[in-house]
């Protein structure tokens, strides 16, 4: 089974978007088991023992929507540091994916990544998906975009995530994209996919696993070009490989990955 953790807060609309994403996974009714987690935040007077799952409207809405689509659901309430409990639970359950609902708007429609979501991104090596709002998913095939950089390890992790989706060989179509930074001017060099080892290896791995692959190389501003490619192909999700290590093994999120996560209106998954 494909195990998914869905941590929710009290914002019901965001939580429902998380549930809709999970129900859209290939063959979700037969292949997916979901754990809906509500963490009582620090500072609340109540503890997990004193808060019933049925009292949290957003969590109930998620569980009910999943069960309407015949997805197996476990209901969990914990307390403590929210991001710490999410990371602990995903490890305890050995989940394949964490599905967060973390985009928020502040000020003049500025999009922000919630602090809990960012903490989870940087604290786990498992794939973390931030869902979009109002996304319409494909009914038959799942189209995903993998924008890769020149790091073969990151590209391989992106490919492994896609190949590990439920029924990937039967239902997933992947576009592996490499963007030559800012090379969209007149007279720019030819953009050859085969020049990029990480892209070639990611595409080859996916094909070895039976996933249909499109290879694309182009030039331009990276984040904008990725988002345009996602829109043109009407993909169901973007899979980025943005975790990097800096200083004394400090984990940071690459600026391009963060730009894509904040700017996309469709689900974006950050792999290890």
Image (spheres, grey):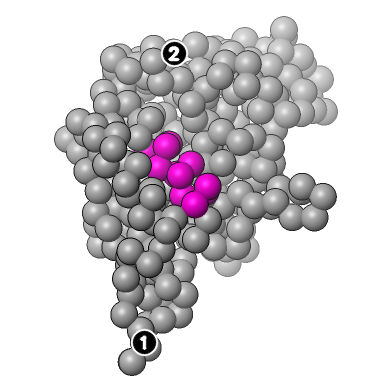
Query: What residue is at 62 percent from the left and 10 percent from the top?
Result: 52
Q: Quadrant of residue 48?
A: top right
Q: Nearer the viewer, residue 147 or 5?
A: 147
Locate residue 78, reporting x and y percent: 68, 16
Q: How many marks?
A: 2
Query: What residue is at 24 percent from the left and 35 percent from the top?
Result: 210
Query: What residue is at 33 percent from the left and 92 percent from the top?
Result: 187
* Observer able to see residue 212: yes
* Apparent side of residue 27 relative to residue 22 in the rendered image (left or right): left
Q: Nearer the viewer, residue 166 or 4?
A: 166
Locate residue 181, reporting x and y percent: 47, 75
Span shown in magenta: 152-162
Q: Residues within 10 Å of mark 1 (few under 14, many from 20)?
A: few
Residue bearing mark 1? 188
In magenta segment, residue 147: no
Find the distance from the CA under tag 1 to the CA under tag 2: 52 Å
Residue bearing mark 2? 73
* Observer able to see residue 56: no
Q: Nearer the viewer, residue 142 or 78?
A: 142
* Apparent side of residue 30 relative to residue 39 in the rendered image (left or right): left
């Amino acid at each position: 089974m494909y195990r998914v953790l869905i941590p929710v807060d009290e914002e019901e609309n965001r939580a429902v978007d998380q549930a809709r994403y999970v129900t859209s996974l290939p063959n979700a009714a037969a292949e997916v088991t979901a754990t809906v987690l509500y963490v009582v935040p620090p500072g609340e007077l109540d503890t997990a023992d004193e808060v019933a799952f049925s009292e949290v409207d957003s969590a109930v809405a998620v569980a009910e929507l999943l069960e309407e689509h015949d997805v197996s659901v476990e209901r969990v309430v914990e307390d403590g540091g929210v991001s710490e409990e999410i990371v602990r639970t995903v490890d305890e359950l050995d989940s394949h994916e964490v599905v967060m609902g973390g985009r928020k708007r502040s000020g003049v429609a500025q999009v922000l990544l919630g602090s809990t979501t960012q903490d989870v991104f940087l604290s786990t090596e498992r794939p973390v998906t931030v869902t979009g709002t109002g996304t319409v998913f494909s009914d038959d095939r799942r189209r995903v975009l993998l924008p890769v950089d020149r790091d073969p390890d990151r590209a391989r992790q992106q490919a492994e995530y896609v190949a590990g989706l439920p029924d990937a060989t039967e239902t997933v179509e992947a576009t592996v994209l490499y963007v030559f930074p800012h090379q969209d001017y007149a007279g720019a060099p030819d953009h050859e996919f085969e020049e990029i080892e990480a892209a070639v290896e990611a595409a080859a791995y996916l094909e070895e696993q039976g996933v249909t692959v499109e290879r694309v190389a182009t030039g331009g501003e990276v984040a904008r070009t990725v988002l345009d490619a996602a829109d043109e192909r009407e993909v169901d999700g973007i899979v980025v490989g943005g975790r990097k290590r800096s200083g004394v093994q400090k984990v940071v999120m690459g600026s391009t990955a963060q730009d894509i996560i904040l700017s996309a209106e469709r689900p974006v998954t950050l792999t290890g």
